[in-house]
Image (cartoon, rainbow, N blue to C red):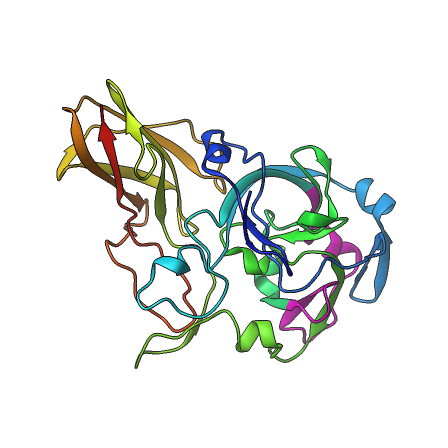
């Protein structure tokens, strides 16, 4: 892991971690130190133990989570905030109770407009509109990659909200409570806002489409035929295509198996190059027509940088 900040811990996987579809070392994003959290969850006034949750209907799926500040270090000028490179993203298999099932047992009161998800780390909390909370893919997760969820990744219980940037997947979940007015907590209305210069401020929410080349790596030296590999994802719709461009020329690309509606998708391209220096980049496009930009819109908090990453390497 590449430690970005030590206290609180923020760390990116190594490039080697991105060679497999399930990321061996999941990225770590924290605003505070790890808390001590009890093995229970309060939902609209009703308390569920971890044991009770494990006995409820189970759902398991792969979900790619990306930090909203991923790529912040490559904005110019660099905005303030945690100095993420390109590796603030990971893919894992999550197991837990669908939030919708819990809401059947502990229904929100009449007049509820949002649910607030309280984390155990001091004051971190986020909300979702009530209508969105019944989406079957949203989990109260207690397992990651078929192992008990560790404290480092939000255990014993965390929210997993596919499609959204990872700030919505509240860790160390202790309480879900209803509100009849829009929630105005700090991490809802002050932080995680897209603030372009002179433009309209809006909340950060759905992950933008992105392709990330994981090999070859920047300044690496390779011999023989070059295999360009990477992962592509979008919170809006499935990845439809990836373009790979080497030295200004587009090359044929093969998409790997579809790992599910919420997981990234692999892509690869084989190309034979002459000895010397070369440059490659990839551009993702989803089935709604959203395409990764060459340059992302600069904003004062450094969010949603899904710009194309250029990789320069040498062939021996």
Q: Nearer the viewer, residue 170 or 29?
A: 29
Give the quadrant of residue 231. top left
Image quadrant containing the N terminus: top right
Vertical placement of residue 143 versus 38, above or below: above
Asked whether residue 245 appears in the rendered view, the answer is: no
Asked whether residue 272 appears in the rendered view, the answer is: yes
Q: Is residue 70 left or right of residue 121?
A: left
Extreme residue in the top direction = 224
| Residue visible at 42% across and 73% down in the picture | 202
Q: Nearer the viewer, residue 297 or 162?
A: 297
Measured from the top left, where is residue 271 in percent x and y? 21, 24
Image quadrant containing the C terminus: top left
Q: Is residue 292 magenta?
A: no
Measured from the top left, where is residue 43 in percent x and y? 78, 62
Vertical placement of residue 47 versus 196, above or below: above
Q: Is residue 315 left or right of residue 52?
A: left
| Residue visible at 83% across and 67% down in the picture | 45
Measured from the top left, where is residue 27 in percent x and y? 56, 47
Q: Is residue 118 magenta?
A: yes
Q: Is residue 107 left or right of residue 287?
A: right
Q: Nearer the viewer, residue 38 or 238?
A: 38
Magenta range is 96-125
Q: Nearer the viewer, residue 90 or 221?
A: 221
Vertical placement of residue 101 versus 110, above or below: above
Give the quadrant of residue 227. top left
Measured from the top left, where is residue 87 in percent x and y? 46, 47
Could you tell me how many numbered marks the image carries? 0
């Amino acid at each position: 892991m590449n430690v970005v900040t030590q206290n609180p811990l923020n760390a990116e996987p190594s490039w080697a971690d991105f060679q497999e579809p399930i990321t061996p070392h999941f990225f770590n994003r924290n605003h505070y130190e790890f808390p001590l959290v009890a093995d229970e969850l309060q939902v609209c006034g009703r308390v569920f133990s971890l044991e009770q949750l494990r006995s409820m209907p189970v759902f398991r799926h792969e979900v790619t989570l990306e930090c909203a500040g991923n790529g912040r270090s490559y904005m110019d000028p660099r905005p303030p905030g945690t100095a993420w490179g390109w590796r603030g993203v990971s893919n894992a298999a999550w197991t837990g109770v669908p939030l919708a099932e819990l809401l059947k047992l502990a229904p929100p009161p009449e007049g509820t407009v949002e649910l607030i998800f309280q984390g155990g780390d001091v004051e971190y909390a986020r909300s979702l509109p009530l209508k969105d909370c019944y989406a079957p893919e949203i989990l109260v997760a207690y397992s990651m990659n078929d192992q008990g969820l560790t404290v480092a990744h939000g255990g014993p219980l965390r929210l997993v909200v596919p499609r959204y940037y990872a700030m919505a997947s509240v860790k160390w979940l202790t309480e879900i409570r209803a509100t009849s007015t829009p929630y105005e907590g700090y991490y809802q209305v002050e932080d995680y806002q897209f603030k372009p210069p002179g433009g309209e401020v809006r909340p950060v929410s759905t992950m933008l489409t992105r392709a990330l080349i994981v090999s070859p790596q920047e300044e690496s030296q390779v011999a023989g035929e070059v295999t360009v590999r990477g992962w592509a994802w979008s919170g809006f719709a499935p990845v439809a295509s990836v373009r790979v461009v080497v030295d200004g020329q587009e090359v044929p690309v093969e998409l790997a198996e579809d790992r599910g509606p919420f997981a990234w998708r692999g892509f690869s391209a084989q190309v034979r190059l002459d000895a010397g220096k070369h440059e490659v980049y990839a551009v993702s496009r989803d089935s709604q027509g959203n395409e990764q930009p060459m340059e992302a819109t600069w904003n004062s908090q450094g969010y949603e940088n899904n710009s194309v990453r250029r990789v320069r390497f040498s062939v021996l």
